Image (spheres, coloured by chain):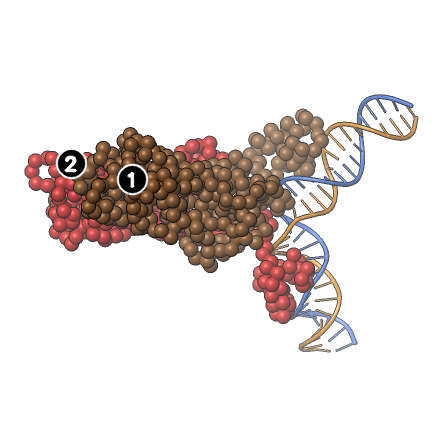
Chain colours: A brown, B red, C blue, D orange
Amino acid sequence: MASAAGVSISTASKALNDTGRMGAETRERVKRIAGEIGYRPNALARGLLSKRSFTIGLLTNDTYGRFTLPVMAGISDALVDHGVSVFLCAIEDDPALAQTHVDAMLDKQVDGIIATGKRLDRRLPVDLSNLHVPVVYAFTEGTQNSVTFRSDDEQGARLAVEWLAKIGRRRIAHITGPEDFFSVRERAGAYHQVAGHREPVLYGVWSESWGHDAVEQLWRRPGEKPDALFCGNDQIARGAVDALRERGIKVPQDVSVIGFDNWEIVAAQTRPPLTTVDMELKELGRQAGLTVLALAEGRAVEPGVRKLPCRLVVRQSCGG
Amino acid sequence: MASAAGVSISTASKALNDTGRMGAETRERVKRIAGEIGYRPNALARGLLSKRSFTIGLLTNDTYGRFTLPVMAGISDALVDHGVSVFLCAIEDDPALAQTHVDAMLDKQVDGIIATGKRLDRRLPVDLSNLHVPVVYAFTEGTQNSVTFRSDDEQGARLAVEWLAKIGRRRIAHITGPEDFFSVRERAGAYHQVAGHREPVLYGVWSESWGHDAVEQLWRRPGEKPDALFCGNDQIARGAVDALRERGIKVPQDVSVIGFDNWEIVAAQTRPPLTTVDMELKELGRQAGLTVLALAEGRAVEPGVRKLPCRLVVRQSCGG
DNA sequence: TGAAGTTGGTAAAAGCTTTTCTCAGTCCAA
DNA sequence: TTGGACTGAGAAAAGCTTTTACCAACTTCA
């Protein structure tokens, strides 16, 4: 212990924390010696006393990491400066596993929990509503009176469709995922609002092959073809772009395509690279982190759902 | 505290831990009451005493998560039964950030650290060699006398090329990543060993477009064309498959293609889905987790590099 | 019946910090 | 010279659990 190299335990503590009364010279000396011997206070002991472990838990059922990783990066980014570390717990829709992890986090006296997932309209398979630590929901459905962060899919979709309209596209089709997804309905709603009801919405699944098939369907139909495709995610968009190329239709000259998610691995590798909507998940994570920290410190936070704006990432699949 | 609902503090502790001497009936009663009031011991206090926090740190510079996520899943999977939680720290090749995270982990008295990355032949930008907690390296280069887990890329490559040979392919080309990657050289070495030196190795970058370009190069050359491609990763393979399709060459009828990584999002969505080599990163993580736990418990572990076998995942891009 | 052993439980210490309380000494003013 | 205020530092408690030492009561055996 640092006190061995100087004064008493309590004086050392006060010196290092800049608290209590003592001679400036003593304080300096203690600090210097502590630095020299590389003394670092034991966070366990500190936590035992202060009731703050400077630790939070991140619970997710998104094993693939598509959504969790950016969120995690944002949380970590926001909290590392506050000395807070993050337990990452992946629970694959397994209630027992989820409970095990929650219990472990609680035992370890986490200051708070952030729940995240892969879908806005689904709950994690564990009840977090009556814990004695604050809980914040990010990109997953929260409980009554909780704080929830989510992307503003309506605004994101509007961004995309308005962009297509702005560059002169008039027959914009929407190829998207399963209709029972809340975000699908929200994006489709915004699409209708901006583009009207002239072109159909094609509901399907979140895969490239569905994007491919949907283009086949659209182009097999008689009558005028779309001059733009707004796709529900980047994978669908990629499948669509591939199908268009196979039909000899040029992207973006003949048809503009916009995706959703800005999943680099898909969007940037498509030929041409996809213009797409970014949900700003890292920012979402950052805000969730700051919020759970505020709650942990006893600051009041207004409950409710906070929608964070999306951003349009312009690459080459639109022209304009 | 549970003692309020029963006996003395020490009796309660002994009852719950099945230690010490006491009446069976007393023990049962304490356990029952503890269960009823939902008592859970404070891991901080326990850790303070036992010098074990039941917490480990996972350090990674793979922000994208391609490699880290499976490794993390394996670690968590192996350790959750032992009550161990994992701090995930993403350090993006930033030495200062890395040090900050390591210090935070050490302050929190982690029982051990697992270092992982995105490349077998690169070190993390922080020195972990003289910590007073055990360190295990997984899928990143370790220090002298450390325990390191890595995939056996040579064996994986052999698996792929032998499979191609077995289904009757004779002119197998190898399109791969940058030659300065250790794993690239190892895979190429195994390729030469099995397939001989009849076809060239094309070194490039880890992208779809390189796979695409490489096929262009190969087919523009005069003479006989390859009847199989062994690609350095799934993205290259996907680019190659796309290029072949555009040339009207059928996969797998005319040319067989094998990738490397088994990155579902790429491999499964390619048309046709890719046969590929899986590095079994989850298993790698599991073993790393168990090893760091063993070390933390003071059990001796032989230092050295442990190569874990890869597995061939057969989909439709090979035929045979 | 008395010594030795067994049984069931409690008290106390240890682990490391932080915080509050206390104390000895110093300085100044009356 | 004495009383009060102030200063610098240490003692002790608290936070929660586990472990060791200990004690009182009971049993067993000679």
Residue at 57% from the left image edge and 31% from the top image edge: A35
Q: Amino acid at mark 1?
A: Ile
State whether residue A24 is above or below residue A43: above
> In front: mark 2 or mark 1?
1
- Please give the chain letter of the residue carrying mark 2: B
Q: Tell which of A251 and A138 is nearer to you.
A: A251
The kind of residue tagged 2 is Glu
Q: Is residue A133 visible?
A: yes
Which numbered circle lies on residue A216?
Answer: none
The picture places residue A239, in percent across and down from the top left corner, at 25, 44
Q: Residues within 10 Å of mark 1 (few under 14, many from 20)?
A: many
Q: Residue at x 49, y 42 (%)?
A: A306
* Residue linked to disc 2: B216
Q: Which residue is mark 1?
A: A172
- Cα–Cα span, label 2 and label 1: 34 Å
Q: Position of residue B75 (x, y in %)?
A: 41, 50
> Could you tell me which quadrant the N terminus of chain B lies in?
bottom right
Question: Residue B172 at what x, y percent from top left?
Answer: 15, 44
Quadrant of the image containing the C terminus of chain B: bottom left
